[in-house]
Amino acid sequence: MSVETLDIETRTPSWRRVTRHPALMEYRRLAFLVAAVNLAVFVIGLRDGVWFSEGAFALDRIADLALINLSLGILIRQQRVVNALFWLATRIPTSWPLWMRWGAGKVFHFGGLHSGGTVAGAIWLGFLTYAMIANRLSGAALPSDLTLGLSAAMVALMALMIVTAIGPIRARYHDLFERTHRFVGWTVLALFWGQTLSIARDAGVPAMETPAFWMLCILTLSIASPWLSLKRVKVEIDKPSDHVVLARFNYGDTPFAGSSNAISHTPLGQYHSFANIPAPNEEGYRLAISRAGDWTGDFINNPPDHVWVKGITTSGVARIEELFTSVVYVGTGSGIGPILPHLLKGKVPNRLIWSTRAPRKTYGDALVDEIEANTPNPVIWDTVTDGKPDLSALALQAVRESGAEAVIVISNQKLTRKVVHDMESLGIPAYGAIWDS
């Protein structure tokens, strides 16, 4: 396959290169929207005297805004909510205009609402704590010392969670980020319950008569839900090389293409999500796990007999293929894992570009044969013999040859963002993971 040289910057208008830049991705636009709405609400409240009246801060109104934002941030990441969002987005028929389907395919950027909502909620909670202290210093008997203490502790712990979630810190100290998000998050939820009950006692009303009580019930169920389905399951390991293993599961769950499951060695240990690889007319599924750190390295070096699976099968990026009449898949290395189930399913016509090191030696003849048998004219690029390819050029050529409407990229962060940016700068819908979790 001959490949033309692709000079994106000379082929596309500068305005499109800017508007489709990763810095302006939909994830950040949603987070900015949440921030803008909250700022507008705060300013309007200042103008209309909503937050301060009769010589004291209106604590109930400030608390409502904190609860609304935190609820948005938590619920939008709930696995069943995520699946519902993907289901709704992919109900759009392929007969609708491309620009509408292009936008609907960005459904996986919902994490912008998560980050925007939780940060805004933490800020409102800080404002609430400040308002409580100010009211007490002005001579008010309430809120109680207990309420003040619980509120201050929540603010401090949420600040810690936000700091560890900042991109560079999260990437460098991912294990710390995961532990902080889990265990500090649970602590904040417990403090939230204590604060709600304490505020109700301060006000002399039954807690069950307050909206915050029932919203906390929903939030608690949402957070507990993935853990309620925790199970220890048997796993069979096929190890074609020291770089990758194929883990096979058959415990009564056959997930859908475009989904993932989270697994761990221990119930409360590190959970890592991998794309499920179901096959038509077969029970169970496979996971492709390649060496990419201490956890995966240990998994490959010391294959387990059993693992823990948490939560329910959750939709992923590639599920949005259903919005298009045909797609081009671009994958590198173990990125073939999320792609393979769609090739096997064959619901949407596709072309494949897979760049990897020594594909047959690394992933085994059986997997490569399976790929070649389930997609027409796949481009399987061996980086050992052919060097690193220009994936944007390959993707563009595949789009032109096949008439595909969209490109779906499964690779590392740098390559994913580059190919997505290049394609969208040319007016081609493109999608790839955004590393928001």
Image: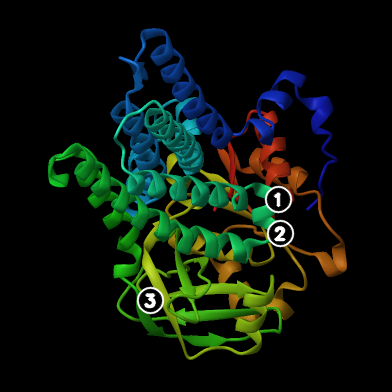
- Nearer-N-terminus badge (1/3): 1
Q: Position of residue 340 (x, y in %)?
A: 53, 64
Q: Amino acid at mark 3?
A: Gly
Q: Residues within 10 Å of mark 1 (few under 14, many from 20)?
A: few
Numbered badge on residue 168: 1
- Residue 409 visible in the displayed image: no
Image position, residue 322 (x, y; %) = 43, 45
Q: Residue at x 79, y 26 (%)?
A: 11
Judge the density around disc 2: few (<14), some (14-19), many (≥20) Cα neighbours within 10 Å. Answer: few
Residue type at numbered disc 2: Arg
Q: Nearer the viewer, residue 316 or 407?
A: 316
- Residue 96, compared with residue 370, is above or below; it is above
Question: Is label 1 or label 3 in front?
Answer: 1
Instruction: Say which element carries label 2.
Output: helix
- Please say if the residues under marks 1 and 3 sit with CB atoms less than 8 Å apart: no
Query: Mark 2 highlights which residue?
Result: 172
- Left or right position of 268 against 415: left
* Residue on which the image places disc 3: 284
Asked if the residue under mark 1 is in contact with the one under mark 2, i.e. CB atoms within 8 Å, the reply is yes
| Quarter where residue 289 is shown | bottom right
Q: Residue at x 42, y 8 (%)?
A: 47
The amino acid marked with disc number 1 is: Pro
**Image quarter of residue 10:** top right
* Spatial CA span between label 2 and label 3: 34 Å
Left or right, 72 with reference to 112: left
Q: 47 or 168, which is in the foreground?
A: 47
Q: Tell me, yes or no, if residue 149 can be seen here.
A: yes
Q: Position of residue 181 (x, y in %)?
A: 50, 58
Front tag of 2 and 3: 2
| Residue 323 x/y as whole percent | 44, 40
Q: Nearer the viewer, residue 428 or 16?
A: 16
